[in-house]
Image: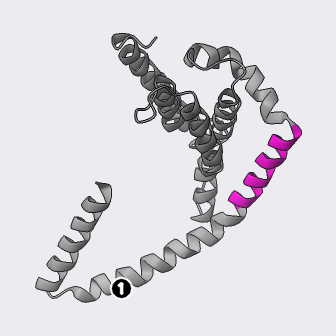
Amino acid sequence: MVNILWGVFIIIGITFSFFTGKIDIINNEIITSSKSALNLMMEMLPLIAVWTGLMKIAEDSGLLNLIAKKLSFLLKHLFPTIPKSNEALGLIASNIAINMAGLGSVATPFGLKAMKELQKINDKKDTASPAMITFLVLNTSGVTIIPTTIISMRMLYKSANPTEIIITCLIATLCASIAGLILDYIIRRKNGNV
C-alpha cells in the first residue's frame, strides 16, 4: 500500500514539473538526493558496524542473556502466553536492551528472530498472536535511553549540541511505550487474551 502511495506521489510530482516547465528541478533533485543518501549511508556505516559487532560480542559472552534474566520479571507479565524457558523471551529482552541504547537498526535481527520464535508457538499461523502484537507495540514505541543514531546524525550535520535531545527522546519514547502497552492491554482484555 505504501509503495502505491509513494508511486502516486512520484508520478504526480513528475507530471506537475513537466507541465510547469520545471523538469530540470526534478533532474537536479534526483542527482543531489541520491548523492546525499549515499554520503549519509557511508558516514553511518561505521557506527552501525561497530555497534553490531559489540552486540554480537554481548550475545556471545552471555551479557544479553543476563539482561534478559533481569528483564524477565517485566517480560513474564507483558507476555503471559510465552513459556518461561522459550528462547523468544531472551530475544525480546535483547531487542529491548538494544533499542534502549538507541540502535534500532542493530536490534532488527533480534526482533526478526523473536518473531520467528513467537510464530513457532502461535496456534493460528495465519494470524498474529497476542504476544506478537505486544512485542510489535513494544518494539515500535521502544524506550530509548540514549538515542545513539540520532546523536550521531546530529553530529554529522554539525549540530551545536547534539546530545541536547536525550531527555526529550526519553520522555517521548517512555510516553509512547506506556500508551501503547496500555492500549494493547485494553484490546487484549476486550478480546479475552489476557
Q: Which residue is mark 1?
A: 28
Magenta span: predominant SS is helix
Numbered marks: total: 1
Q: Secondary structure at mark 1?
A: helix
Quadrant position of residue 59 = top right
Q: Residue at x 32, y 61 (%)?
A: 3
Q: Tell me the magenta residue range.
A: 47-61
Point out residue 188 in the picture as x, y percentages from the top left corner.
Answer: 40, 16
Mark 1 Cα shell of 10 Å, populated few (<14), some (14-19), many (≥20)? few
Verify whether residue 140 appears in magenta. Answer: no
* Above or below, 17 relative to 192: below
Q: Residue at x 27, y 89 (%)?
A: 24
Q: Residue at x 64, y 36 (%)?
A: 100
Say left or right for 85 vs 18: right
* Above or below, 118 relative to 101: above
Point out residue 81 in the picture as x, y percentages from the top left corner.
Answer: 56, 17
Point out residue 111 in the picture as x, y percentages from the top left corner.
Answer: 60, 41
**What's the residue type where badge 1 is placed?**
Asn
Which residue is nearer to you in this view: 133 or 127?
127
